[in-house]
Image: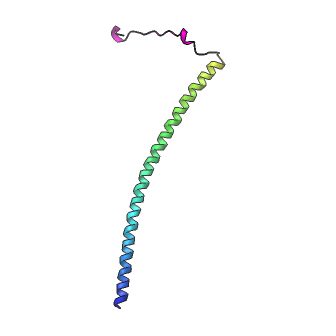
Amino acid sequence: MGKQLFMLVAAVVVCAVAVVELRHRNRQLFAELQSLQIERDAQVTEWGRLLLEEGAWAQHRRIEATARTRLGMDLPDPRHIVVIRSAGVGGRP
């Protein structure tokens, strides 16, 4: 009877330690999951911002291409560009 009781107590202790270990690991993995979800959300936000930026750049390229093909416009020769500086507020340059 004593050996059976000892084996039963040992089995209960082993099971209890296993439960504690598994719960601890579960909490660690959940914390990691939350961290990865936050990172994913930041990446999704960045992706959306980059898509908007790409759309803006594509619009500029399309306008430039249309100006070149339909209107025959082109960039002037740098020798023909004149920079005019205006006076700032209150007459200061």
Residue 53: give x, y in percent of width and height. 51, 32
**Residue depicted at x 44% and y 51%:** 36
Write the start and end of the magenta stretch as one range: 73-93
Residue 88: give x, y in percent of width and height. 37, 11
Q: Is 70 or 25 nearer to us in this picture?
A: 25
Indicate whether 91 appears above or below 5: above
Q: Is 52 or 21 nearer to us in this picture?
A: 21
Indicate whether 49 appears above or below 85: below
Q: Is 78 or 92 nearer to us in this picture?
A: 78
User: Is 72 in the magenta?
Assistant: no
Q: Residue 92 is drawn in which quadrant?
A: top left
Residue 68: give x, y in percent of width and height. 63, 19
Quadrant in which the N terminus appears: bottom left
**Residue depicted at x 43% and y 48%:** 38
**Residue depicted at x 35% and y 82%:** 9
Helix, strand or loop for the magenta stretch, by majority: loop
Quadrant in which the C terminus appears: top left
